[in-house]
Amino acid sequence: MDFACLSHRLVVEVDGESHTHHDRDRTRDALLAKAGWHVIRITNQDVLRDLDGVVAGIAAVAETRSPRDGRRKD
């Protein structure tokens, strides 16, 4: 886990090519989801090429999550 927003139960993973489609990552993401967490995976290249876009994307996801328990706002 690279970053986490506890109040929104949001995890941000910044990964290189070595993490693309790994079973271990999928298993961990599933366990986190079962516990009410949402995982966002961002590549190193996205961060280097478009940091503002990455930040905007994270903020957009955070806005869809309740600040108390992390559930989606509907």
Image: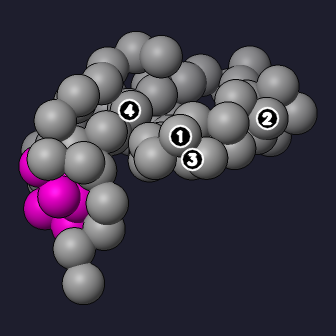
Name the residue: 16% across, 35% down.
7
Residue 62 within the segment the image draws in magenta: yes
Considering only vertical position in the picture, is 46 above or below 25?
Answer: below
Report the residue that reaches farthest toward the bottom. Answer: 74
Q: Which mark is residue 35?
A: 1
Q: Which mark is residue 27?
A: 2
Name the spot of residue 70 as percent of width and height, x first. Answer: 28, 50
The magenta segment: 60-67
Tell me the CA gap for discs 2 and 3: 10 Å
Q: Secondary structure at mark 1?
A: loop
Which quadrant is home to the C terminus? bottom left
Q: What amino acid type is highlighted by mark number 3?
A: Ala
Q: Earlier in the sequence, mark 1 or mark 4?
A: 4
Residue 33 in view in this figure: yes
Foreground: disc 1 or disc 3 = 1
Position of 26 with respect to 11 (left or right) is right
Mark 1 crowdedness (10 Å alpha carbons): few <14, some 14-19, many ≥20: few
Foreground: disc 2 or disc 3 = 3
Q: What amino acid type is highlighted by mark number 2?
A: Thr
Q: Earlier in the sequence, mark 2 or mark 1?
A: 2
**Quarter of the image where one finds residue 31:** top right
Considering only vertical position in the picture, is 18 above or below 37?
Answer: above
Residue 34 within the segment the image draws in magenta: no
Q: What amino acid type is highlighted by mark number 1?
A: Ala
Q: Secondary structure at mark 2?
A: helix
Q: Which mark is residue 12?
A: 4
Q: Earlier in the sequence, mark 2 or mark 4?
A: 4
